[in-house]
Image: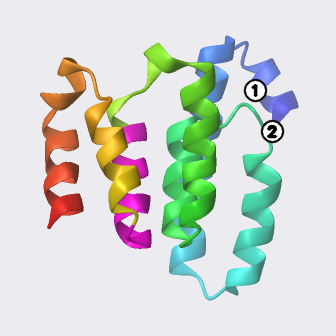
């Protein structure tokens, strides 16, 4: 994949998007096929070690495979490194993991630390409603 992307002369941001799209296509393929969950998880492990995969994609994939604690681990690492770059998608996935694990205190802490922009985001608001319900 790396060689093909270099031939296309994409910049780093474009490469990241293409790899993310390919990863999403892989997820769809696995979902539609009858591969075992262990095969899916092994591929996921190898891909999520790559820094090119976006944090949002990693967290969503971990949530989709019911690895909620790992989702929160990724969130914590990202939050500590890039405090000002937390996106609505990252918050949505973190709240989803907290809800599935029953971590009310953890979800409330995330809620309390959200910026006004994120608090006014419709996706975050919907996730907060789902979290508290």
* 82 vs 94: above or below: above
Nearest the eye: 49 or 10: 49
Does the magenta portion include 94? yes
Principal SS element in the magenta part? Answer: helix
Q: At 80% across and 69% down in the image, what residue appears?
A: 42
User: Can you identify the residue that label 2 sits on?
Assistant: 1
Report the magenta residues as a range. 90-102
Query: How far from the left and from the top, in percent, is residue 6?
Result: 81, 20
In which quadrant of the rendered view does residue 26 lie? bottom right
Residue at the (43%, 49%) spot, across then down: 94
**Which quadrant of the structure image shows residue 77?**
top right
Q: Residue furthest right?
A: 3
Asked if 71 appears above or below 85 in the picture, the reply is below
- Position of residue 133 relative to residue 114, above or below, is below
Task: Tell me the CA gap for discs 1 and 2.
Answer: 6 Å
Write down the residue under mark 1: 5
Residue plotted at (62% across, 88% down): 34
- Do the residues under discs 1 and 2 have CB atoms within 8 angstroms? yes
Q: Is residue 128 left or right of residue 46?
A: left
Question: Could you tell me if residue 21 is visible in this image?
Answer: no
**Left or right relative to 48: residue 72:** left
Tell me if mark 2 has few (under 14), some (14-19) or many (20+) residues whose alpha carbon lies within 10 angstroms of its own. few
Classify residue 71 as left or right of residue 115: right
Can you tell which mark lies on residue 78? none
Q: Secondary structure at mark 1?
A: helix
Of 126 and 16, nearer the camera is 126
Relative image position of residue 47 (x, y in whole percent): 76, 50
């Amino acid at each position: 994949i790396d060689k093909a992307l270099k031939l296309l002369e994409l910049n780093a941001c474009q490469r990241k998007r293409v790899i993310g799209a390919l990863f999403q296509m892989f997820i769809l393929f696995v979902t539609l096929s009858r591969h075992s969950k262990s095969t899916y998880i092994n591929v996921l492990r190898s891909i999520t070690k790559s820094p090119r995969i976006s944090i949002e994609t990693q967290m969503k994939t971990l949530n989709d495979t019911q690895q909620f604690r790992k989702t929160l681990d990724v969130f914590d690492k990202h939050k500590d490194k890039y405090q000002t770059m937390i996106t609505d998608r990252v918050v949505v996935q973190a709240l989803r993991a907290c809800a599935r694990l029953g971590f009310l205190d953890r979800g409330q802490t995330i809620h309390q630390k959200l910026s006004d922009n994120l608090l006014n985001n419709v996706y975050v608001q919907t996730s907060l409603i789902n979290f508290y319900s």
